[in-house]
């Protein structure tokens, strides 16, 4: 049992290595095409680091056997919830830690408020449709509802791309000039080498996600916890490691728009295109635990949006409220509440 748990941890570490390579590449690509931090974080970084949870249901259905669908749905539905609770609270803790160690003057997040405002509104609208459509499908079991919802969400994400690419850069935005694999390239790092590092990073992330699926099934079977419950709580932690890790490191570098945009862009991607994948590839039969996690994700998004509207900016302290939602959900799922 201990050996299997160590394998799970090892798979997570593989994912972390991949996401560090990828995030570094993304900054170079953003600089090359003169993209704002909002566009780079919400599109390039978010979509790339969201690949594990995008591919997870496909791999789970192919290699997961009888538990494949439970793992797939858990990975898809648990992702927005995990990002809007645990990931945001990690960013908040990072900001508070920097304030206590005198590395930041305030606990205010220096983000592109216009871009984050759009991301939050987009998620709230999109996920409201997801929840309503899922409830209708679960009640009537009409395939037309499922396919229509999948098509609508895909088109909605195309609109998100269009708007996000139009965000203007702010004066303080800078990108790194250091490329991790530069010493392995014989010529001066070119955009081709940057793309190569990005592909390597993504392949490492995907490989780590595939390893994690197999180890998760073994551990879940030995512990005796229902596979859907386990995948709702643990699978998103592993598949969302890139967003969490990148956002924390970008926060430490005081690149708050990249950090927050990475999370919100991933949430937007996962609540539309990734849900579309789930709708098309699974039966999409959602139980109470799944619906509760979806509801908590929506509540967290609404609370953050309300804070931004009332205060005009984001602070670390209110973001910690999202951690309460996560802990309540864990308590409900494991039967402690």
Image: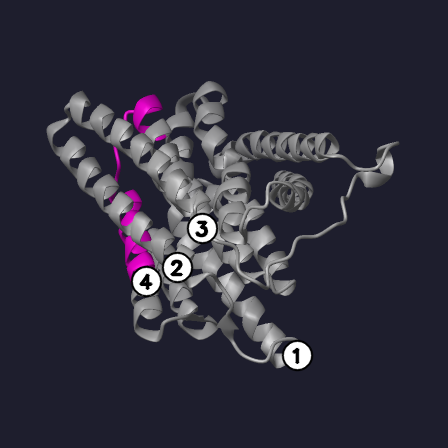
Q: Which callout, 1 or 2, points to the residue nearer the camera?
A: 2
Of mark 4 and mark 3, the one earlier in the sequence is 3
Of mark 1 and mark 3, the one earlier in the sequence is 1
Q: Which callout, 1 or 3, points to the residue nearer the camera?
A: 3
Q: Which callout, 4 or 2, points to the residue nearer the camera?
A: 2
Q: Report the magenta residues as a range.
A: 278-302
Q: Residue, x 56% and y 70% (percent of image)? A: 95
Q: Residues within 10 Å of mark 1 (few under 14, many from 20)?
A: few
Of mark 1 and mark 4, the one earlier in the sequence is 1
Q: x%, y% of residue 302?
A: 29, 60
Q: Which callout, 1 or 4, points to the residue nearer the camera?
A: 4
Q: Nearer the viewer, residue 181 or 298?
A: 181
Disc 2, SS: helix
Q: Magenta span has 67?
A: no
Q: Which mark is residue 167?
A: 3
Of mark 1 and mark 2, the one earlier in the sequence is 1
Could you tell me if the residues under marks 1 and 2 are in contact, i.e. CB atoms within 8 Å? no
Could you tell me if the residues under marks 1 and 4 are in contact, i.e. CB atoms within 8 Å? no
Q: Nearer the viewer, residue 184 or 292?
A: 184
Residue at the disc numbered 1: 101
Q: Which mark is residue 114?
A: 2
Q: Nearer the viewer, residue 30 or 104?
A: 30
Task: Find the distance from the CA under tag 2 to the CA under tag 3.
Answer: 8 Å
Disc 1, SS: loop
Q: Residue, x 74% and y 32% (percent of image)? A: 193
Q: Eyeballing the image, is 55 above or below 93? A: above
Q: Residues within 10 Å of mark 3 (few under 14, many from 20)?
A: some
Could you tell me if the residues under marks 4 and 3 are in contact, i.e. CB atoms within 8 Å? no
Of mark 4 and mark 2, the one earlier in the sequence is 2
Q: Which mark is residue 55?
A: none
């Amino acid at each position: 049992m201990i050996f299997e748990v160590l394998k799970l941890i090892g798979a997570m570490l593989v994912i972390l290595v991949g996401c560090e390579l990828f995030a570094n590449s993304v900054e170079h690509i953003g600089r090359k095409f003169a993209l704002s931090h909002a566009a780079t974080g919400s599109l390039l970084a978010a979509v790339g680091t969201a690949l594990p949870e995008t591919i997870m249901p496909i791999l789970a259905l192919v290699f997961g056997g009888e538990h494949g669908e439970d793992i797939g749905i858990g990975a898809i539905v648990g992702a927005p919830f995990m990002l809007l609770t645990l990931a945001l609270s990690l960013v908040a803790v990072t900001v508070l830690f920097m304030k206590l160690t005198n590395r930041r003057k305030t606990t205010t997040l220096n983000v592109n408020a216009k871009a984050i405002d759009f991301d939050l509104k987009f998620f709230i609208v999109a996920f409201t449709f997801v929840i309503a459509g899922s409830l209708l499908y679960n009640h009537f079991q009409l395939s037309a509802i499922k396919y229509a919802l999948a098509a609508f969400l895909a088109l909605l994400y195309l609109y998100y791309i269009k708007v996000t690419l139009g965000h203007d850069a702010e004066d303080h935005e800078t990108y790194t000039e250091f490329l991790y694999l530069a010493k392995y390239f014989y010529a001066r790092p070119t955009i081709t080498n940057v793309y190569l590092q990005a592909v390597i990073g993504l392949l490492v992330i995907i490989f780590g996600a595939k390893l994690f699926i197999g180890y998760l099934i073994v551990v879940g079977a030995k512990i005796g916890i229902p596979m859907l419950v386990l995948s709702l709580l643990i699978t998103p932690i592993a598949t969302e490691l890139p967003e969490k890790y990148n956002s924390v490191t970008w926060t430490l570098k005081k690149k708050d728009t990249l950090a927050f945009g990475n999370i919100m862009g991933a949430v937007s991607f996962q609540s539309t295109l990734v849900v579309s994948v789930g709708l098309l590839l699974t039966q999409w039969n959602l139980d109470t635990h799944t619906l509760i996690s979806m509801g908590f994700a929506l509540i967290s998004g609404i609370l953050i949006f309300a804070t931004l509207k009332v205060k005009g900016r984001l602070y670390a302290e209110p973001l910690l409220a999202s951690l309460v939602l996560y802990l309540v959900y864990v308590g409900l799922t494991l039967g402690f509440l």
